[in-house]
Image (tube, rainbow, N blue to C red):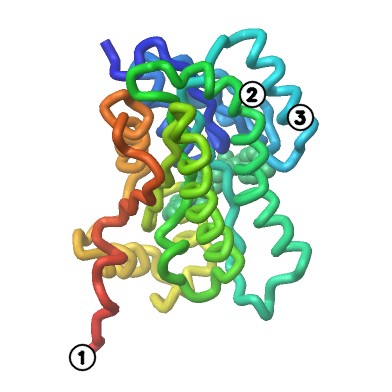
Amino acid sequence: MGVLDGKTAFVTGGTGGIGSAICARFEREGAEVIAADLTDHGGAGTFHHYNVTDEAGIIQTFEGLASRWDKLDILVNAAGIEIEETIENTTLEQWNRIFAINVTGMFLTSKYALPLLRNASGSKGGASVVNFGSYDGFIADPGLAAYCATKGAVHALTRAMACDHGPEGIRVNAICPGYVDTPMLQSFFEGDGSGGSGGNIDSLQKAVRDVHPMRTYGKPEDIANLVNWLASDEARYAAGQLWVIDGGLSAQVQQMKL
Ligand SMILES: NC(=O)c1ccc[n+]([C@@H]2O[C@H](COP(=O)([O-])OP(=O)(O)OC[C@H]3O[C@@H](n4cnc5c(N)ncnc54)[C@H](O)[C@@H]3O)[C@@H](O)[C@H]2O)c1
């Protein structure tokens, strides 16, 4: 028997690195899962082609879902992109695109999911919405200006949604990961490898590990564990919070290189 038996879940970015680990965990815990994404990678859950920037498509998706499910217990907003630039090198088009996906996409999906989420509010733990923020919403990585700004917006939106919809029995929280080993991080490792480590992937991976007090970066499953708890009835008292999970990265001041 799983902790999500009888629950329904809709996961945007559901075929991405973190999203697919979440879908797999939810399925193992007994939930019926929809992995909503632009591209199907054949992972867990029922794939649904979904674009978080397409309002008409989102309305259609939730109309279709309402004829199939009478309630939605869990919404995970994990779709996201990164742009590795300072503001000087970010075009207005790039700025608008990252906000459209990381912030407006979360607003639109949550807005149209609300009627079904309200139908789940009577369950022991209430309905659960998990938004993806980042430690970059608190402290900045150099050269990620627009991304950091979107994650700060996600954190503020999460608190606002939690206040507005808590009284309706809907818990809203954000997960704020540090480095997680997904295609996003691998492309950083396998890219030009500059990252201060002279192009050697092994030394770059070691450098990333070594900035963490725990001397490791995260796996998608580490993130899925926390999302699973927030989605479960055990988390009935958890709402409106920004859950940092980063191997201690953001607890530590930068070390002097003596
Ligand atoms: N990997 C990390 O180190 C890390 C750290 C902090 C926060 N995050 C956040 O976690 C979330 C998941 O990231 P990930 O590492 O799994 O990245 P990923 O690139 O593996 O997955 C992101 C998914 O979002 C999907 N997506 C992009 N645009 C979309 C759109 N318009 N509509 C629908 N889906 C769309 C992509 O197709 C992809 O499957 C993101 O919000 C990211 O910002 C990741």
Q: Amino acid at mark 2?
A: His
Q: In the structure shown, which secondary structural element does the residue marked by tag 2 occupy?
A: strand
In the rendered image, the residue lying farthest to the bottom is: 258
Left or right side of 134 for 46: right
Q: State how far apart marks 3 and 1 are (Cα).
A: 55 Å
Find residue 122 and report its horizontal and vertical position in percent: 42, 17
Q: Quadrant of residue 232?
A: top left
Q: Which mark is residue 258?
A: 1
The quadrant the C terminus occupies is bottom left
Mark in the foreground, 2 or 3:
3
Q: Earlier in the sequence, mark 3 or mark 1?
A: 3
| Residue for badge 3 | 57
Q: Is ligand 1 closer than 8 angstroms to the Cβ of mark 2?
A: no
Work out whether residue 179 or residue 115 is closer to the camera in this orientation and state it: 115
Q: Amino acid at mark 3?
A: Gly
Look at 55% across and 69% down and name the residue there. 144
Q: Amino acid at mark 1?
A: Leu
| Residue for badge 2 | 48
